[in-house]
Amino acid sequence: MTKTFTYDDVVRYLYAETTEKENDQIVAAMALNDDLMNFYLDSLEIKTQMNKIVRVPSEKAVAGILNYSASMSTKLRALPC
């Protein structure tokens, strides 16, 4: 019986969430199915682009976190043990 693979299977393959046996089967399915192969290539490109995204918090956000942390440590030191 031939297994039918879906886009979900291709995504699992892309993120290395498949077994070695599944890997072989998915690669074979993509070789025979242009839609699956195109989806894989598009998804791979999107994943590559997403991995390049770097988020940096603003100075204001960092300052707010540090101020909150400092105020909490002061309050904790003031509590009786």
Image (cartoon, rainbow, N blue to C red):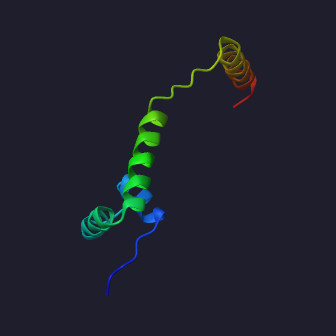
Residue depicted at x 44% and y 54%: 39
Q: Is residue 64 visible?
A: yes
Query: What x and y, as percent, mark residue 13?
Result: 36, 58
Residue at x 47% of width, y 62% of height? 7
User: Residue 51 or 29: which is nearer the viewer?
Assistant: 29
Foreground: 66 or 7? 7
Q: Is residue 39 left or right of residue 55?
A: left
Q: How many marks?
A: 0
Q: Is residue 14 left or right of residue 8?
A: left
Quadrant of res 32: bottom left
Rendered position, 7 above or below 5: above
Q: Tell me where residue 51 appears, x and y as whole percent.
A: 44, 34
Locate the C terminus by quadrant: top right
Q: Position of residue 54 (x, y in %)?
A: 51, 25
* Picture quadrant of residue 33: bottom left
Q: Residue furthest bottom?
A: 1
Residue at point 28% right, 70% down?
A: 25
Residue farthest to the front, as pictured = 34
With respect to residue 76, does 59 lie above or below?
above
Q: Position of residue 48 (x, y in %)?
A: 41, 37
Residue under the image location 44 percent in, 46 percent down: 42
